[in-house]
Amino acid sequence: MPMNAIHRRICQSDEWAESMRTRKLPWAVGDLRLDGDVLELGPGYGITTRWLAEHGGRLTAVELDPDLAAGLRGQFDGEVDIREADATALPFPDGSFDTVVCFTMLHHVPSPEQQNRLFAEARRVLRPGGVFAGTDSRTSLRFRLIHIGDTCVPVNPGTLPDRLTGAGFDHTTVDTGNRSIRFRATV
């Protein structure tokens, strides 16, 4: 979804990459095994994709933006299966993945209804025993300022467990940390 110039610069910065690699992704993933078929939703510029590629199994990434998808294909050159697609209508059969992840992208999905469709699609493409996990940002003044002119629909951590359960997940957990939400749900 659209991002303003400041937001794009932040998401491509070395500081953001270092924060994601050293703090946010280890916190988000925790003890989750990434050794099977893993699907990443909304990888953007590929910082999270690089980390995932270094930590596990067969990685597929779905990116809606055609320019970002093309950049990812060039960056990963066959190492990761990059698909240009909408995460609310995934182009995979039921039960294709062991794990589905998304990091700091849910607030770019244009409505709670579309976020719920994304959750349902993540559930649909997971195998029995599969896990959907990820993070998103918590709303704050700084968060709102960075997103001026962006698509920005923050996820309420208080309602997220019920929304994931409504999409068909079991055993949902949602935690909040420093400016972030972490969630995990199983099939």
Image: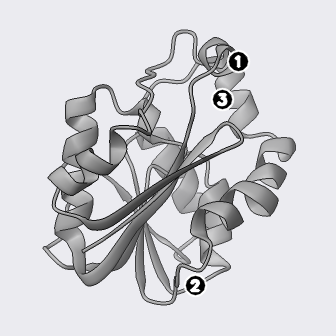
The three-letter code of the residue at mark 2 reads: Gly
At x 66%, y 18%, the residue is 146
Question: Which disc is residue 56 wearing?
Answer: 2
From the viewer's side, name the closer residue of 182 and 46.
Answer: 182
Is mark 1 in CB contact (under 8 Å) with mark 3?
A: no
Percent x, y of residue 187: 24, 74
Answer above or below: position of 100 versus 24: below
Q: Residues within 10 Å of mark 1 (few under 14, many from 20)?
A: few
Percent x, y of residue 114: 23, 35
Is mark 2 in CB contact (under 8 Å) with mark 3?
A: no
Question: Which disc is residue 8 wearing?
Answer: 3
The three-letter code of the residue at mark 1 reads: Arg
Percent x, y of residue 43: 52, 52
Q: Please name the residue that numbered disc 1 is placed on.
A: 142
At x 67%, y 55%, the residue is 47
Residue 133 falls left or right of residue 114: right
Answer above or below: position of 91 versus 55: above
From the viewer's side, name the closer residue of 132 and 174.
Answer: 174
Real-space CA distance between mark 2 and mark 3, rounded to the nearest whole angstrom? 27 Å
From the viewer's side, name the closer residue of 155 and 62.
Answer: 155
Percent x, y of residue 137: 58, 37
Q: Counting residues from the N terminus, which is met first, the one under dot 1 or under dot 3?
A: 3
Q: Residues within 10 Å of mark 3 (few under 14, many from 20)?
A: some
SS at mark 3? helix
Residue 21 falls left or right of residue 154: right
The three-letter code of the residue at mark 3 reads: Arg
Q: Counting residues from the N terminus, which is met first, the one under dot 1 or under dot 2?
A: 2
